[in-house]
Amino acid sequence: MAGVNRHMMMMATAALVMTAVACDSRARQEGEEGNVQFFYLPADSSTEFDRPLAVGSGMLLYLEGIDDRRVERVVEMRVEPEGVFRVSPSTEYPHAVVLSGQHAGTARLYVEVEGGGERFSDATSFQVADVARADLAHVCADKANAAYLVGTPISLAFQRYSSGGDVLVGSARSCGLELSPETMDGRGRCDEAGFHLTPITEPGPVLVRSSIQPARGSRSELGVQVISPEVLDFEPASGRLRVGRSDKLELRPVTRPPHGDIWPVCNHLWMNVEVLTPETCLGSDGSVNFDVEPSEENTISLRGQAPGVCEISVILPQISDAEWIFDAPVDER
């Protein structure tokens, strides 16, 4: 079973690489000799190649041939000067290498590759920088405390900067953040898109502390409350609908008493929506019953049909059978 899962993961990652190449969302750089294009897939979808790699972080760097050349495997690699970053072959992808930041500085990566019956070489430079300060925040609210549903992945907004203000890239387990209680140690990983915690299976509080100098206006610690679905509630819907137009209603999930304080809930939810007043509103495609996926970030697209009040029913089929009713005014254009 483990072998099957590993194979599936490799296929999924390969598909991700192919999709990224097709959309040209890679951070890429042509080599000095014009033979190889170096690229990586930033977690934050940036296409800027020359952002520094954080000391203590690693990244997967792919190589592809330019013009008709193909890179089938890397046969030699070296770093000049040594000590700025390490380079090692990828255990999963023969056309990729792993870079690991060691010390602040700039070094040149030289590679020799094989493909299409020939060998050819190329080189490019990388900068490595120390982490000087960091931004730490919840993704859904500018507050010290927020909640997340039990059993779901947790991502915090976390960005590292060099002393010169550059955003640092790379993935690491030890990235200057400490978790308590101690049973949470080792559950997180950071990259340029944030700090990611594996799903936590029991409700309860988790404190995230940063040992890095906070950026101006940022916090050095956050409270994470892991909640069960029974604690989930919503604020009134936010948004305005107009006749003849498709507009969005934003639903903001929160915790509710008797939990205590009302905290924002930072999950994007799968919602089933039923329009209860089709005379005043419909789904943007004319439907009275439709699903809203998590990628839509808790916003519902509705089209105003006539002035009045639009009323909808929302159920969260993946986590609860509870029903919430929301309404919003529908105005003339």
Image (spheres, rainbow, N blue to C red):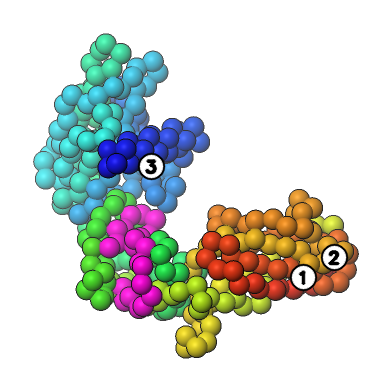
Tell whether 46 sits left or right of 272: left
Which quarter of the figure is the C terminus placed in?
A: bottom right
Which secondary structure, mark 1?
strand
Asked whether residue 28 appears in the rendered view, the answer is no
Amino acid at dot 3: Leu
**Within the magenta stretch, is there residue 206?**
yes
Which secondary structure, mark 3?
loop
Residue 13 position by quadrant: top left
Numbered badge on residue 259: none
Numbered badge on residue 41: 3
Asked whether residue 308 appears in the rendered view, the answer is yes
Amino acid at dot 1: Glu
Asked if the residue under mark 3 is in contact with the one under mark 2, i.e. CB atoms within 8 Å, the reply is: no
What count of labels does the image hold? 3
Residue to which mark 1 is pinned: 311
Could you give the CA–CA distance between mark 2 and mark 1, rounded to whole angstroms? 9 Å
Residue sitting at 54 percent across and 61 percent down? Answer: 318
Residue to which mark 2 is pinned: 280
Residue sitting at 66 percent across and 73 percent down? Answer: 324
Work out which residue is located at the far left of the displayed protein and give it. Answer: 82
Residue 327 position by quadrant: bottom right
Residue sitting at 77 percent across and 70 percent down? Answer: 311
Work out which residue is located at the far top of the displayed protein and give it. Answer: 117
Nearer the viewer's eye, disc 2 or disc 3?
2
Span highlighted in magenta in the image: 187-208
Tell whether 44 sits left or right of 292: left
Q: Residues within 10 Å of mark 1 (few under 14, many from 20)?
A: some
Amino acid at dot 2: Thr
